[in-house]
Amino acid sequence: MGHAQLETDELFVKKGTMTRNPFHMDRAEFAAWKAQAEVTLKERLFAIGQPLVYEKDGKFVAEYPDGHIEGE
């Protein structure tokens, strides 16, 4: 990884609300951070009326705030 790429990664991480850079986390810290980030993302999408779209078993599915899932 070049110096320019490292600076770009550092800037990307600093723009959010993170308190610790994920590039410097151990596996347990990273797993906890990732789990919390997924919950936060889901809450933000639902708050603006958007579904959470992800791939499951090779197909894209959309999960909605009311709990129903399309595309399974």
Image (cartoon, rainbow, N blue to C red):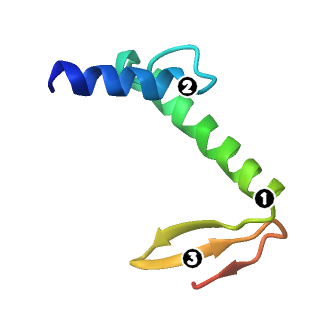
Give the x, y percent position of residue 52. Answer: 64, 63
Residue identified by numbered label 2: 15
User: Which badge, 2 or 3, is on the more N-terminal residue?
Assistant: 2
On screen, residue 41 above or below 65: above
On screen, residue 17 above or below 51: above
Give the x, y percent position of residue 35. Answer: 58, 39
Label drawn at residue 46: 1
Residue sticking out furthest to the front: 4
Work out which quarter of the rendered image holds the C terminus and state it. Answer: bottom right
Q: CA distance from mark 1 to mark 3?
A: 15 Å
Q: CA distance from mark 2 to mark 3?
A: 30 Å
Q: Nearer the viewer, residue 7 or 31?
A: 7
Q: Is residue 6 left or right of residue 46?
A: left
Residue identified by numbered label 3: 61
Q: Quadrant of residue 8?
A: top left
The amino acid type found where label 2 is placed reads: Lys
The amino acid type found where label 3 is placed reads: Val
User: Which badge, 1 or 3, is on the more N-terminal residue?
Assistant: 1
Q: Is residue 3 left or right of residue 20?
A: left
Q: Secondary structure at mark 1?
A: helix
User: Residue at the spot x=58%, y=85% of the render?
Assistant: 71
User: Residue at the spot x=63%, y=23% of the render?
Assistant: 17
Give yes or no for contact between labels 1 and 2 (Cβ–Cβ under 8 Å): no
User: Residue at the spot x=39%, y=20% of the render?
Assistant: 10
Q: Is residue 64 left or right of residue 13?
A: right
The amino acid type found where label 1 is placed reads: Phe
Q: Nearer the viewer, residue 44 or 5?
A: 5
Give the mark toward the camera: 1 or 2: 2
Q: Is residue 3 left or right of residue 32?
A: left
Give yes or no for contact between labels 2 and 3 (Cβ–Cβ under 8 Å): no
